[in-house]
């Protein structure tokens, strides 16, 4: 292990002298992702709170047909706007978010005791309009329920007759679990922090040395290629872990700045979170380090390796997008999938759920095995002339 230790110290010392590596590994990585996360959370939560508190502007077509109905909606927070000629086209072209159209026979049906029709015109493909539609629907439903009860009372019938079944909702979600719905991208940000932390060292120790023509003299020394590769991998992993640890501390500070009053978000990262996440992430950091070295080994220049590893940063995004697009109940086998298992573990920690030692053990073991397999693949590449001889 002594040759590997010498290479490890060499790579660390050279990286500490390189301002570019220090800036990206110990500053940009740990600080950029938490700040980006904080900005996103403030934008999302602030936007929803602003919509919920402000009056709801809605273009109303046929408002003169149902003045009492419009007045009741205004009391609930709706702000009627003048009608437009072609509401469907206006919504399709995104000139309007939501239009309420009252049927011409609304007044006649209302006086006759028949169901009166109204139409909500909106574009369901726009996520930002969904909350406005739900808010207007709840206003209309509240008015409909109240009016129906008054009609029954006027006929001497108890309103409860029309509701033979009453649904009592018992939401078991804790504020922490509700907050985790907004924090689904946090695992990706943590993994991205580790990726950025080791990326520059992995590039510099492979493609950078090839470009400077200093890798070949290192490899011709009477030292096993495995020792050289092990030293480079450990140095890359150390910088990744340092970046991850600094990132966790930054997220800990960011947790105090999140808007926690309304949506149920609280301090999401504490000592327990850090103590569990770090050992869970160590095998993944080793896998990331050796994978970055393997990818950078195919590049002939620093810039080319930077392009390759820049694209590789999108890989951890796949499990996050998959879990958000296709919600699934965590299963034990998922812990055995690198990246996927770590993200599930972090999400369960955010929700305050119990995590079995078996799941953590399986995830750690399988990820370590994957790192070992990746090390063997990279070692075969290091033993070829493709890496040993500079192009």
Image (tube, rainbow, N blue to C red):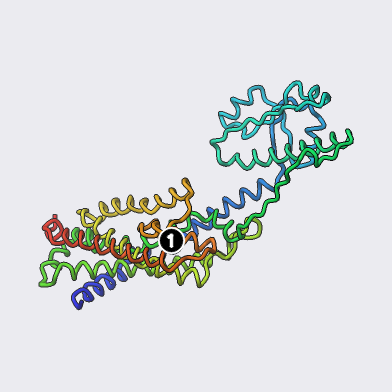
Numbered disc 1: secondary structure? helix
Mark 1 crowd level (few <14, some 14–19, many ≥20, 10 Å Cα): many
For this rendering, which residue is in front, 290 or 243?
290
Residue plotted at (16% across, 60% down): 380
Residue plotted at (43% across, 61% down): 190
Direction from residue 82 to residue 346 in the image, left or right? left
Give percent across and percent down for residue 142.
75, 40
For this rendering, which residue is in front, 376 or 39?
376
Give percent across and percent down for residue 298.
21, 54
Residue 315 vertical position relative to residue 261 in the rendered view, above or below:
above
Direction from residue 230 to residue 81 in the image, left or right? right
Q: How many marks?
A: 1
Give percent across and percent down for residue 80.
73, 34
Direction from residue 272 to residue 117 in the image, left or right? right
Residue 333 vertical position relative to residue 153 in the rendered view, above or below:
below
Residue plotted at (21% across, 76% down): 6
**Residue ranking furthest to the bottom:** 2
Mark 1 lies on residue: 190
Is residue 162 at all visible to an observer of this figure?
yes
Give percent across and percent down for residue 222.
10, 72
Is residue 192 at all visible to an observer of this figure?
no
- For residue 316, what is the image quadrant? bottom left
Q: In which quarter of the image is the C terminus?
A: bottom left
Residue 150 vertical position relative to residue 312 in the rendered view, above or below:
above
- For residue 15, what is the image quadrant? bottom left
For this rendering, which residue is in front, 270 or 7?
270
Q: In which quarter of the image is the N terminus?
A: bottom left
């Amino acid at each position: 292990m002594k040759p590997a230790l010498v290479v490890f110290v060499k790579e660390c010392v050279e990286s500490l002298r390189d301002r570019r590596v220090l800036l990206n590994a110990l500053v940009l990585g740990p600080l950029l992702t938490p700040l980006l996360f904080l900005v996103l959370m403030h934008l999302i939560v602030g936007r929803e709170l602003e919509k919920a508190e402000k009056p709801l502007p809605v273009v109303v077509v046929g408002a003169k047909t149902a003045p009492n109905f419009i007045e009741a909606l205004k009391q609930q927070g709706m702000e009627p706007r003048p009608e437009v000629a072609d509401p469907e086209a206006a919504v399709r072209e995104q000139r309007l978010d939501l239009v309420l159209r009252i049927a011409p026979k609304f007044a006649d049906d209302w006086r006759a005791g028949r169901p009166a029709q109204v139409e909500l015109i909106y574009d369901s493909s726009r996520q930002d309009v969904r909350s406005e539609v739900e808010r207007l629907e709840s206003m209309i439903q509240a008015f409909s329920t109240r009016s129906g009860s008054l009609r029954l009372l006027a006929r001497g019938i108890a309103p409860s007759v029309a509701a033979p079944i009453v649904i009592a909702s018992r939401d078991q979600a804790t504020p922490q679990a509700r907050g985790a719905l907004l924090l689904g991208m946090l695992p990706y940000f943590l993994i991205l922090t580790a990726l950025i932390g080791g990326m520059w060292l992995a590039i510099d120790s492979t493609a950078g040395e090839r470009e400077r023509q200093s890798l070949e003299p290192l490899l011709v020394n009477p030292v096993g290629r495995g020792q050289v590769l092990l030293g480079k991998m450990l140095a890359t992993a150390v910088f990744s872990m340092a970046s991850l640890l600094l990132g966790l501390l930054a997220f800990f500070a960011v947790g105090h700045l999140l808007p926690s009053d309304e949506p149920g978000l609280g301090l999401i990262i504490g000592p327990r979170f850090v103590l569990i996440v770090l050992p869970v992430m160590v095998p993944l950091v080793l896998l990331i380090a050796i994978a970055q070295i393997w990818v950078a080994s195919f590049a002939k220049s620093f810039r080319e390796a930077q392009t390759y590893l820049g694209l590789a940063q999108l890989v951890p995004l796949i499990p996050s997008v998959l879990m958000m697009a296709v919600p699934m109940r965590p299963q034990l086998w998922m812990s055995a999938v690198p990246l996927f298992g770590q993200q599930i573990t972090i999400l369960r920690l955010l929700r305050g759920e119990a995590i079995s030692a078996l799941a953590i053990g399986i995830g750690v073991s399988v990820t370590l095995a994957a790192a070992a397999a990746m090390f063997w693949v990279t070692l075969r590449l290091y033993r070829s002339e493709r890496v040993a001889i500079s192009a």
